[in-house]
Amino acid sequence: MILTMNKLITIESHFLQQQKLYPEVNAEVTDLLNDVAFASKLVRREVVRAGLGDILGLAGTTNVQGEEVKKLDLFANEQIINAIGQHGRFAIMGSEENDSIIIPPKNETGNYALLFDPLDGSSNIDVNVSVGTIFSIYRLKGDDPGKASLDDCLQNGAEQVASGYVIYGSSVVLVYTTGHGVHGFTYDPTIGEFLLSHPNILTPESGKYYSINEGSWAQLNDGTKRYIDYLKEEDPATGRPYSTRYIGSLVADFHRNLLTGGVFVYPATKKHKNGKLRLMYEANPLAFICEQAGGRATDGSRRILDIKPEELHQRTPLYIGSVKDVLTAEEFEKGSR
């Protein structure tokens, strides 16, 4: 097989090109992204051979959200903290698996904050379903990295410098944005490099898939139920019915819909009145990517990136994907359809 020129562009070369095109994407930012890419290689190394080692199953602990932690959750979390923290480019970090903020060693500490979900979808890892790492980068509010605090992490999603995710599936793909489009890279294990495979990703205005956990039907509000029923109706003029695709791994469901078009819905329910997904670790970074690809992300009424966070592990409903599909969902949620 002969690779096209796109397939010969390494992630490092791409970052350098972006620096030339967009001065605000400076060397600091590209160094940060390179750190994240390196950390994802360490996680990938264990994910692809998870069944061969003693790394599957529960760790016997619960996280700050009260969820049972998988052994691979802990491994991924430790690898990312160690790989990234040692370089001193982040002044502060926050992880879905940690109760509070993480302060790396102070030597040569940089001016940025990193928030990440080390292994999204980890409940599926034991059955070989795609999982992923989601990350978000913010610039500190002040000029002194030594005074970095929780306040530097609690910024609106619109303030993100960069965000992205890595999906560990049939291939390993890293997708990111710095506010200048969305680009995807596939990992080539034969040379140990991420190569540009999905330049300038644009999501369709409307899709053909919807993703929701219909096992929670009894917990859904009436607006959400009417919206899902609407998507199931037959109407060729509007491309309905949609097909349901729900993996139960947010990063996998989002990645498919980003490329093919569709909507992912994790609404507020009777059991989870504020939603279940994390604003800082999941909704904000994916919303930034989605908007840069021409999509839309809201909590049913408000733009995700405009929500002012009040706590590190804040939850939110999430409607994300093709712009027309999300707008229609919002109409049902406010009762106008």
Image (cartoon, rainbow, N blue to C red):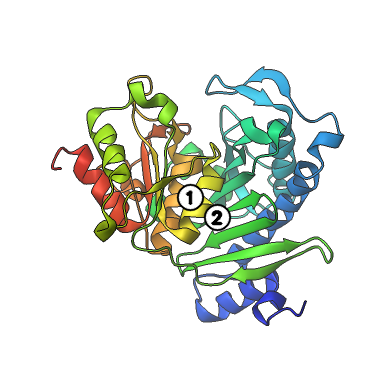
Please, what secondary structure does the residue beneath circle 2 have? strand
* Residue 139 seen in the figure: no
Where 245 falls versus 165 (above or below)?
above
For this orientation, the residue located farthest to the top is 60
Q: Nearer the viewer, residue 15 or 110?
A: 15
For this orientation, the residue located farthest to the left is 336
| Residues marked 2 and 1 touching at CB (< 8 Å) | yes
- Identified by mark 2, the residue type is Gly
Residue at position x 47%, y 69% in the image: 181
Locate the N terminus by quadrant: bottom right
Q: Tell me which corner region of the image, top left, top right, bottom left or bottom right, holds residue 199.
A: bottom right
Mark 2, residues whose alpha carbon is within 10 Å: few (<14), some, or many (≥20)?
many
Mark 1, residues whose alpha carbon is within 10 Å: few (<14), some, or many (≥20)?
many
Q: Is residue 27 left or right of residue 283?
A: right
Please, what secondary structure does the residue beneath circle 1 have? helix
The dot on residue 164 is 2
**Looking at the picture, how far across and down is residue 155, in whole percent?**
41, 46
Residue picked out by circle 1: 285
**Looking at the picture, how far across and down is residue 123, in whole percent?**
62, 30
Where 285 falls versus 308 (above or below)?
below
- What is the C-alpha distance between the residues marked 2 and 1? 6 Å
Residue at position x 72%, y 50% in the image: 39
Where 4 falls versus 191 (above or below)?
below
Q: Is residue 70 left or right of residue 116?
A: right
Residue at position x 52%, y 80% in the image: 21
Q: Is residue 175 left or right of residue 336?
A: right
* Residue 177 seen in the figure: yes
Q: Nearer the viewer, residue 291 or 83?
A: 291
The dot on residue 141 is none
Locate the C terminus by quadrant: top left
- Identified by mark 1, the residue type is Pro
